[in-house]
């Protein structure tokens, strides 16, 4: 089966910043993404969990995008414009997709 090179970008950011991040991505021409809740984790600031939280204020989300390699720079610039001033992590990995016309 024929596969095509792509980039998978995952942005983990404070849940309250979700709308600002997705707007920046859409403005940069990103046509698709998936948003997942993050239940907890551990990092530079120590262990944290959403357990017992009533609002989204202390939570995190993970926004996942799969894009063509030539669109990576514009996506990263858009993401960094939001993540730069907030808690967040951006990762990029190479991946392969079956239907390149969808990305």
Image (spheres, grey):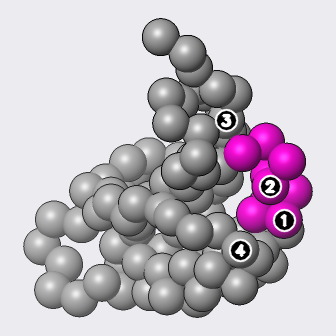
**Distance CA(mark 4)–CA(mark 3):** 16 Å
Q: Distance between the residues labelled 4 and 1?
A: 8 Å
Badge 3 element: strand
Q: Name the residue under label 1.
A: 74
Return the disc, 4 or 2, that comes first in the chain's sequence: 4
Residue denoted by label 4:
29
Give the residue number, with chain letter if any, for mark 3. Answer: 6
Does 83 sit left or right of 47 as displayed? right
Q: Nearer the viewer, mark 4 or mark 1?
A: 4
The circle drawn on residue 71 is 2
Q: Can residue 18 be seen in this view?
A: yes
Q: How far apart are marks 4 and 2 (CA)?
A: 9 Å
Q: Earlier in the sequence, mark 3 or mark 1?
A: 3
CA–CA distance in space, label 3 to label 1: 15 Å
Q: How crowded is mark 3: few (under 14 residues within 10 Å), some or many (20 or more)?
A: many
Q: How many neighbours does mark 1 have within 10 angstroms: few (below 14), some (14-19), or many (20 or more)?
A: some
Q: Is residue 91 visible?
A: no
Q: What element carries label 4?
A: loop
Magenta stretch?
68-76
For label 2, the SS is helix
Please say if the residues under marks 4 and 1 sit with CB atoms less than 8 Å apart.
yes
Eyeballing the image, is 20 above or below 70? below
Q: Residues within 10 Å of mark 4 (few under 14, many from 20)?
A: few
Whether residue 28 sits left or right of residue 34 in the image: it is: right
Q: In this view, does 56 lie to the left or right of 34?
A: left
Q: Residue at x 65, y 68 (%)?
A: 30
Q: Do the residues labelled 2 and 1 touch (CB within 8 Å)?
A: yes
**Closer to us: mark 3 or mark 1?**
3
- Answer with mark 3 or mark 2, whichever residue precedes in sequence: 3
């Amino acid at each position: 089966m024929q596969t095509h090179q792509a980039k998978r970008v995952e942005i983990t950011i404070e849940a309250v910043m979700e709308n600002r991040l997705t707007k920046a991505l859409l403005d940069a021409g990103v046509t698709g993404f998936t948003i997942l809740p993050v239940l907890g984790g551990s990092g530079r600031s120590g262990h944290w969990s959403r357990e017992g939280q009533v609002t989204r204020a202390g939570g995190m989300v993970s926004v996942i995008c799969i894009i063509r390699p030539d669109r990576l720079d514009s996506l990263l610039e858009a993401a960094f414009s939001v993540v730069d001033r907030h808690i967040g992590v951006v990762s990029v990995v190479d991946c392969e997709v079956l239907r390149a016309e969808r990305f």
